[in-house]
Image (cartoon, rainbow, N blue to C red):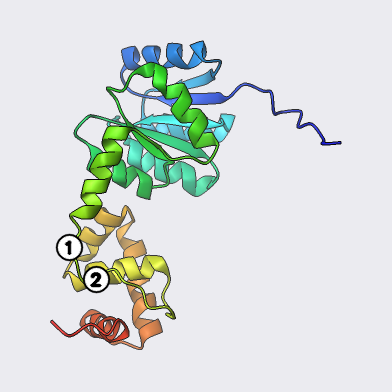
Amino acid sequence: MTEHDPHADDPVRAIVADDDPFARKMIKEALQRAGIVVIAEAHNGRQAVDLTRHYQPDVVLMDIVMPELDGIAATRRIVKENPRQVVVILTTADDDEIGLLGLRAGARGFLAKDVDVDILPQALHGALNGEAAISRRLSMRLVEHVRRVPDGPSGMRPVKSPLTPREWEVLDLLAQAKTTDQIAEQLVLASETVRTHVKNILRKLGARSREEAVGIARRMRNEPPA
């Protein structure tokens, strides 16, 4: 006999974070019509972090542009505290690049703010079941974003490497002559974290400079020097 999970029939508990009271009202009503319980509302990113820590909801629906702490930074803090926390980003119609930053920060998906609000419950249930909550239009933009990546060995990982995937990401950007602050912005990391990654890269590759590390990486990939 299969043991029944006593929480399996419990309604989904959500927090809605948006600085626009009208938007919060519309989202809350749509979720509640679908049986999702909105246990708290946040009007800025810092409050979203605090409420999530306190209530531990099933899902957080997070706007991007909010005072005190934006949605990207709030998502990063929430997921850092609890990697299993499901967060779905809401972005304006032309902010798919910001949506990608949200995914890098740990969000399970991103949806356009002009999406039909009645679609939100289905998207949140999908995210809770391990599916990526991404609207079709933004999915196509994501495909186009990937297709625009230039050909070539940049980004390829050797089968055997002492570096972690994150360190390879940093190294790829070093090869593009990105500064520490530029790398931090692109990977949604603190500058100090990037410096730590660079130190680890130099140590693992036995390099004395960033330029030497890039050269070693090219040889590991059998890539001709620039």
How many residues crowd mark 2 within 10 Å: few (<14), some (14–19), many (20+)?
Answer: some
Asked whether the residues under the numbered discs 1 and 2 touch, taking CB atoms below 8 Å apart as contact, a structural biologist would say yes
Name of the residue lying farthest toward the right: 1
- Return the x and y of residue 193 as percentages of the image width and height: 36, 63
Left or right: 130 in relation to 211:
right
Left or right: 90 in relation to 85:
left
Residue type at mark 1 is: Pro
Look at the image and tell me whether residue 64 can be seen: no
Look at the image and tell me whether residue 28 can be seen: yes
Left or right: 115 in relation to 33:
left
- Return the x and y of residue 173 as percentages of the image width and height: 23, 67
Report helix, strand or loop for mark 2: loop
Report helix, strand or loop for mark 1: loop
Residue 49 tag number: none
Residue type at mark 2 is: Ser
Relative to 181, is 94 above or below?
A: above
Name of the residue lying farthest toward the left: 226
- Position of the C terminus by quadrant: bottom left
Left or right: 161 in relation to 182:
right
Q: Which residue lies at the image location 58% right of the left edge and 29% below the top edge?
A: 55
Q: Which residue lies at the image location 17% right of the left edge and 63% below the top edge?
A: 150
Residue 154 tag number: 2
Number of numbered markers: 2
